[in-house]
Amino acid sequence: MAPAISTLLNTILVALNAANTPTPFDPGFNITAVAATAKSLPSHVWEFGTAIEALLELDTPKYSVFGPSPFPVPTLDPAAVPALAYAQAKIVLGTGAFALDNGDGAAGDPASLGVGATMLGKTNQTFADAAAGEIEYLLSNVPRWVNGAISHRADVAELWADFMYMAPPFIAFYGADSDNATLLETAYIQFELSLELLPFGGSSRTQARYLSGCEDSLPVPAAYAYRSPVFLRGHQPRSCLTILAHGIDLPSLKNAEHPILG
C-alpha cells in the first residue's frame, strides 16, 4: 500500500475512534480521577447538575449537544450511560417549584438538572413530567428583573452568572427536543438579558451577581467559568443550525457574534 494512502487510512481510523471513544486523547492529567472526584464530591443541586453535564460530555459525547445528532433526544438505557445513571441517583423529584429539587432558595440551580431529567424522561415519565414542571416554573413563576431577565433566586429578583449556565441552556435543550421554537428564542433572549447586566469585560463587581438593585462582587474567574460553557455551546455549529432551522430571525445569531444555547 502506498505510504500516502496508508497515512490517510490511519488518520481516518484515528478520527473515527476519537468520535466514538471517550477521552481518546491524553489531556495531560488523570481524567479518570477527575471524573471520579466530580461524581463523589458534589453535595448541592447545582454541583450535581454540573457533574451530570460534564460526565455526559466526557463519557458519551455523542449524546451531548456536541454530538452529531443530539435532537430529538434519543431513548437511552440509563444503565448504559454513566451520566444518566448518576442523574437518576441524584435528582430529587418533586412538583412545581420543587420539580427537580428545592434549590435551597435558588430558582436557577435546579434547572441545571434539566438536561439529565429530559433525557431520563424518554424512559421514565416521572422525569419527563419533572422537566416540564421545571420549565413551567421558570417561565411563569420566578421573579424577573426590570429588563425581563429571569431571576436566579426564587424569592427576589437577583441576577447571577450561575444562572446563565444552568437555566437558558436547559430551556433551549428542552425546546430543541420538543420542537418548540418559542422556547429556543426565549433561551437566547434570557441569556442576552442577563448579559446586559453581567457583561464580559465589565467591572469586577458586575461579573458575577446583581443583587436586588445592588452590585455584588464575586471572584471574576467563577463568573467566566459559568458563562464559558454556554459560549462553547453557542458556537457549536449544530446548535446554531438547530435554532436557525426553526426560522428564528436573529441576525446576530447568524453572524455568530452571540451565543446560542444548546
Image (cartoon, rainbow, N blue to C red):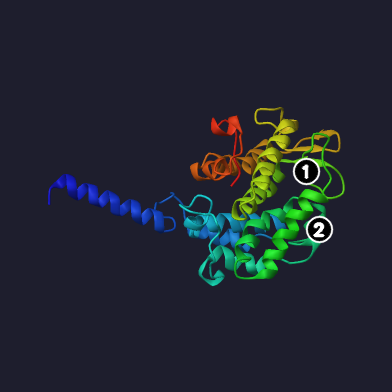
Q: Nearer the viewer, residue 238 or 244?
A: 244
- Residue density around tag 1, few if under 14, some if 14–19, many if 20 or more, within 10 Å: many
Query: What number of labels is visible?
Result: 2
* Residue 251 place in picture, x, y as percent: 59, 30
Going from N to C along the chain, the mark reached first, 1 or 2, is: 2
* Residue 54 place in picture, x, y as percent: 56, 54
Residue flagged by tag 1: what amino acid is it? Ile
Q: Quadrant of residue 144?
A: top right
Q: Residue at x 54, y 30 (%)?
A: 255
Q: Nearer the viewer, residue 111 or 122?
A: 122
Using the image, determine if residue 260 lies above or below residue 25. Answer: above
As drawn, the residue found furthest toward the front would be 247
Residue flagged by tag 2: what amino acid is it? Ala
Q: Residue at x 54, y 41 (%)?
A: 240
Q: Which residue is identified by label 2?
A: 97
Q: Which mark is residue 150?
A: 1
Q: Name the secondary structure under disc 1.
A: loop
> Mark 1 touching mark 2, by CB under 8 A?
no
Residue 64 visible to the viewer: yes
* Residue 259 place in picture, x, y as percent: 59, 37
As drawn, the residue found furthest toward the left would be 1
Q: Residue at x 47, y 56 (%)?
A: 62
Using the image, determine if residue 204 lies above or below residue 179. Answer: above
Q: Quadrant of residue 150?
A: top right
Q: Quadrant of residue 123?
A: bottom right
Q: Name the secondary structure under disc 2.
A: helix
Q: Residue at x 40, y 51 (%)?
A: 26
* Residue 16 place in picture, x, y as percent: 34, 54
Residue 91 visible to the viewer: no
